[in-house]
Image (cartoon, helix red, strand yellow):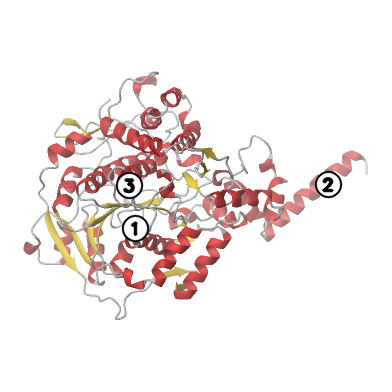
């Protein structure tokens, strides 16, 4: 099983790999591309074709390491898959272990599912429903899923295989990194920074920004709690000076991350990204022009390096090969400072699971030992706990008699069994204490089970960090974002053009998404009344993802987001002059044929 990729059911893009590679991680999961077909919502954390954590620009980058050495050593399953291989088997194991922590029978159902790639979404919904039964259930599921990953993923170095936890202890006690520091030459504004959001070719601030936040919240594009969070920054600009804060950014150069925003506010950024000179030249250049400070791992002492180019050539580390050493360096850097540690690295397909677990290994120990605040960008295309108000709004949209509902329901998309135009509002879950809790199924099936697991690992860690480690957590849902890589795909572009027909959907531009999500992060660490603070009570730990959501309308629309891609493209084409001509011509032919055969 070691060192190869083998194709499993549903993993049509899985490749064949070579032997074990030193220091890398591998498993035998076939690669399932995240951006597969329409419909698709692009979450803020990125749905790029390859690594987005290597550049501010949205360029495709081929990793310079061989993704073939994170082994997934699995216990004997009840029903072994053919050749004991494939993405289906590995992915199911994590989900089965998580849910089996509270319902062994449900875990067995997951293990026995033979069409995992086609059926996985319903098991995620069921897992969240079980988690909502009680706070204990939510924590047990999260811990069960994480334990499975740490007990089954293995780290290979010098031809030796170790369990992930063992590798962190064996190789993480020391490191060879030096510490580099670059201080920016910029200054904060004389009267302090203020909250600003670029939107539709304007930069909104003050009352204009608050008015737009009200508009989004009233329409249903964001939750009122997100409006209130960003308004808090507008009303309290003193909290925007981040010169006293330290942010660890895993994947610091990600186009979707908060690097530039935090720098502009004077933050101290401890950056982790690939050891590529081009990446670090950009990071250093941006830092020089800002009031912020950049702290980073170096292979040589900074005093021996004469220029920024020399420093960039020696900076960085690989989250896959250097996981234990990066962890050890972070444990010792800037001792005594409170950290916020954000997971922003992103890779395509099954590699996303690997990088999520690599980041989790670092975040886990920073939260436990240094009481760091973990930070994540959640995708709206997942199963989330929502408010009753959001649920009722979705019900109301479904019952409206409007252009979208009438045209959609008269189209072939409304035929039973097509999978299109599926009602969004779901029945509530009745918890053990009698409370009714609501959820939304925002999963886009074609994103694949690897994407779902990568994001769920972050959910699980956020729950455990808040409930067990008792640290504050920033884990907000980001809006769908129109990036170059998505809008260059004609099918995606057509669907995005038609999303506005399905109120209250809105696709955000990248600069708007970056600004609002950075604002949410700052709010979470500055406002002690934030629900993510463990000192503030939640009915269920999964409500951590309810507050401050900028879901882009996914929670409050009439139909499930996975069921509107083609209808959205159809509606867009239907309303163009050419589209209307085609429709008129089509019905003219149909009426002509009816007259001919009816003898009119």
- Closest to the observer, 263 or 397: 397
Q: Residue furthest right?
A: 600
Q: Position of residue 163 (x, y in %)?
A: 21, 32
548 over 433 or under it: above or below: below
Q: Look at the numbered disc 2 and give the secondary structure of its residue.
A: helix
Q: CA distance from mark 3 to mark 2?
A: 64 Å
At x 38% / y 19%, what residue is drawn? 80
Q: Position of residue 350 (x, y in %)?
A: 36, 39
Q: Which mark is residue 257?
A: 1
Q: Which mark is residue 456?
A: none
Q: Residues within 10 Å of mark 2 (few under 14, many from 20)?
A: few
Q: Residues within 10 Å of mark 3 (few under 14, many from 20)?
A: many
Q: Which residue is mark 3?
A: 466
Q: CA distance from mark 1 to mark 2?
A: 55 Å
At x 48% / y 34%, what residue is drawn? 126
At x 46% / y 59%, what residue is drawn? 226
Mark 1 and mark 2 residues within 8 Å of each other at the beta carbon: no
Q: CA distance from mark 1 to mark 3?
A: 22 Å
Mark 1 and mark 3 residues within 8 Å of each other at the beta carbon: no
292 over 494 or under it: above or below: below
Residue 201 shows up from this direction: no
Q: Which dot, 1 or 2, sits closer to the camera? A: 1
Q: Which residue is mark 2?
A: 591
At x 33% / y 66%, what residue is drawn? 261
464 over 527 or under it: above or below: above
């Amino acid at each position: 099983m070691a060192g190869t990729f083998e194709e499993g059911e549903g993993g049509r893009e899985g490749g064949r790999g070579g032997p074990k590679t030193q220091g890398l991680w591998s498993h035998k999961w076939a690669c399932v591309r995240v951006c597969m077909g329409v419909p698709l919502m692009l979450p803020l954390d990125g749905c790029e074709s390859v690594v987005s954590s290597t550049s501010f620009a949205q360029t495709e980058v081929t990793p310079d390491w061989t993704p073939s050495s994170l082994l997934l050593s699995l216990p004997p399953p009840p029903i072994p898959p053919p050749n004991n291989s494939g993405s289906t088997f590995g992915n199911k194991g994590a989900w089965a272990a998580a849910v089996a922590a509270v319902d062994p029978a449900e875990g067995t159902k997951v293990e026995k599912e033979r069409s995992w790639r086609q059926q996985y979404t319903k098991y995620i919904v069921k897992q969240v429903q079980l988690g909502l039964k009680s706070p204990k259930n939510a924590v047990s599921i999260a811990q069960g899923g994480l334990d499975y990953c740490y007990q089954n993923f293995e780290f290979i170095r010098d031809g030796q295989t170790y369990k992930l936890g063992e590798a962190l202890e064996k190789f993480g006690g020391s490191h060879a990194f030096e510490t580099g520091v670059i201080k920016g030459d910029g200054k904060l504004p004389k009267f302090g920074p203020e909250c600003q959001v670029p939107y539709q070719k304007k930069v909104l601030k003050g009352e204009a920004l608050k008015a737009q936040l009200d508009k989004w919240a009233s329409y249903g594009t964001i939750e009122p709690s997100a409006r209130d969070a960003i308004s808090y920054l507008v009303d309290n600009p003193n909290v925007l000076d981040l010169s006293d804060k330290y942010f660890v950014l895993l994947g610091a150069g990600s186009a979707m991350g908060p690097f530039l925003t935090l720098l502009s506010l004077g933050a101290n950024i401890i950056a982790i990204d690939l050891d590529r000179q081009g990446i670090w030249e950009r990071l250093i250049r941006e830092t020089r022009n800002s009031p912020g400070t950049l702290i980073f791992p170096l292979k040589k002492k900074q005093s021996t390096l004469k220029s920024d180019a020399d420093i960039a050539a020696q900076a960085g580390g690989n989250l896959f090969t250097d996981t234990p050493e990066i962890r050890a360096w972070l444990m010792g850097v800037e001792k005594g400072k409170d950290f916020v540690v954000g997971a922003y690295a992103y890779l395509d397909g099954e590699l996303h699971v690997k990088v999520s677990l690599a980041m989790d290994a670092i975040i886990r120990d920073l939260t436990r030992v240094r009481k760091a605040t973990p930070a994540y960008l959640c995708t709206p295309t997942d199963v989330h706990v929502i408010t009753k108000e959001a649920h009722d709004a979705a019900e109301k949209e479904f019952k409206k008699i409007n252009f979208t509902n009438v045209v959609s329901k008269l189209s072939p998309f409304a035929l039973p069994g097509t999978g299109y135009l599926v009602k969004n509002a779901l029945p509530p879950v009745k918890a053990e204490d009698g409370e009714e809790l609501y959820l939304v199924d925002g999963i886009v099936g074609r994103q694949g089970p690897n994407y779902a697991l990568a994001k769920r690992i972050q959910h699980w860690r956020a729950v455990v960090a808040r409930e067990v480690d008792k640290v504050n957590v920033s884990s907000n849902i980001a809006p769908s974002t129109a990036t170059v890589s998505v809008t260059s795909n004609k099918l995606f572009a057509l669907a995005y053009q038609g999303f506005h027909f399905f109120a209250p959907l809105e696709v955000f531009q990248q600069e708007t998404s970056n600004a609002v999500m950075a604002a949410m992060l700052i709010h979470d660490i500055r406002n002690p009344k934030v629900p993510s603070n463990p000192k503030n009570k939640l009915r269920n730990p999964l409500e951590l993802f309810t507050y401050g959501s900028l879901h882009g309308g996914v929670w409050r629309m009439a139909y499930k987001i996975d069921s509107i891609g083609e209808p959205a493209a159809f509606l867009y084409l239907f309303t163009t002059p050419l589209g209307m001509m085609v429709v008129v011509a089509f019905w003219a032919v149909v009426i002509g044929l009816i007259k001919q055969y009816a003898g009119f």
